[in-house]
Image (tube, rainbow, N blue to C red):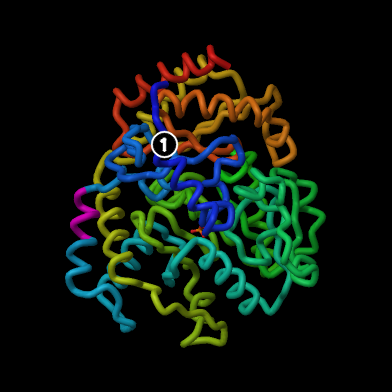
Amino acid sequence: MTQSHEYSEKLWKEALHYLPGGVNSPVRAFRGVGGTPFFTQRAKGSHLWDVDGNEYIDYVCSWGPMILGHAHPKVVRAVQEAARDGTSFGTPNPREVRLAQLVCEAFPSIQKVRFVNSGTEATMSAIRLARGFTKRDKIVKFEGCYHGHADALLVKAGSGGATFDVPDSAGVPADFARNTVTLPLNDFTAVDAVNWREIACVIIEPIPANMGLIPLKSGFLEKLRKLTQESGALLILDEVISGFRIARGGAQELYGIQADLTTLGKIIGGGLPVGAFGGRADVMDMLAPVGPVYQAGTLSGNPLAMAAGIATLEELSQAGTYEKLERLTTTLCDEWKKIVKGHHVRIGSLFCTFFTDRDVVDYASAKTSDTKRYGRFFHGMLERGVYLAPSQFEVGFVSLAHTEADIEQTLRAATEAVRAL
Ligand SMILES: *Cc1c(COP(=O)(O)O)cnc(C)c1O
């Protein structure tokens, strides 16, 4: 409560002058909760320090990538070693092969993979590939699911789209949006009504985590798997958040389902810009230079980014990783539920509390949340040294660096913040 924010306030004024909205990605601007964002000076383990020296327990974790915690020694060393040998070659490099091997071993459905520089590039390219493979134009997505900011996918989108009530972005031609069929999440009837024979692919977050956290109803993924298989459409599972977080093999391992194509990002770059899409070899071999679907990248497979990804995935493959994440998050959430009123969801190391009395099953019910109240709670927590997502429609991330002491401090802060509401 005695925090000073002088330097952050000063930087924010300058940022607003030079950067649209002061940021390079919308949700960072705190518009979902009000107030001025802090500028981070450094981060270590589960903690962030801002430029004014305030310390926070971090439950955003760079929106997912920092599953080992910030500045993990093995990741830092791997990046330093890679940098010493040069930062980009524009030729094949051995680290691309190693990271590809780690991804393919973790996901049985991924026979071949291509690396890109963000989750957005991964989903955008996977959609183009699905269209090229099936020779069909239409795609299916679900309301409130976020798959990055490519034109075809910014239709009824989550994440910033949900926070700012602009699920349909300006600048997306109606001619493009027409080819995106959008359905309510968890709606079996709506899925049955689609003419799947004209659909190139359906893309879904198997663990929807961009409108808050909403579990899929049992049988929903299986239904999509069956309908696509029967009609020749492709099933794309967007595991940019869930890949290597929910289990090593992502939601596909948890639910025992196989995608035709999978998109990855966040964790596989260990905090550097990496995305990937991969899947069936017959589909992936439609990509240039083998096939007619073009996709490329000057910095794709970048040695620094690959090094950070390899170090992260190797560390995650140690025994007990996911059990530990589950245990930590359960410890937090079991007490949290008793303190904070609302609709609580936890899946693995992801958690979310909707500030609503309603049962949340889709985008419409998520939007019944009291976002003003969430904003006040967010600031109550921030003042007490706990950084939650600056939007009701994002999730909390727990890392392997979070400790029992962090959790105790978080729960004490929550008790006080709720009392102050
Ligand atoms: C973050 C995210 C993306 C986009 O990834 P960027 O690296 O931000 O472009 C795509 N899909 C899902 C499910 C995501 O959470």
On the image, the x and y values in percent for residue 257 come to 53, 52
Residue under the point 71% across and 46% down: 165
Chief secondary structure of the magenta span? helix
In which quadrant of the rendered view does residue 155 lie?
bottom right
On the image, the x and y values in percent for residue 385 come to 39, 27
Q: Is residue 323 above or below residue 302?
A: above
Residue under the point 82% across and 55% down: 193
Q: Secondary structure at mark 1?
A: helix
User: Would residue 299 appear left or right of 317 to someone viewing this image?
Assistant: right
Q: Is residue 121 magenta?
A: no
Q: Give the residues in magenta.
A: 73-78
Residue under the point 29% across and 53% down: 312
Q: Is mark 1 within 8 Å of ligand 1?
A: no
Looking at the image, the residue that sits furthest to the top is: 419
User: Would residue 349 appear left or right of 162 to someone viewing this image?
Assistant: left
Q: Amino acid at mark 1?
A: Glu
Residue under the point 58% across and 61% down: 236
On the image, the x and y values in percent for residue 142 come to 69, 52
Q: Is residue 77 magenta?
A: yes
Q: Badge 1 local density, few (<14 within 10 Å), some, or many (20+)? A: few
In which quadrant of the rendered view does residue 77 lie?
bottom left
User: Which quadrant holds the N terminus?
Assistant: top left
Does the image show residue 214?
no
Q: Nearer the viewer, residue 18 or 251?
A: 18
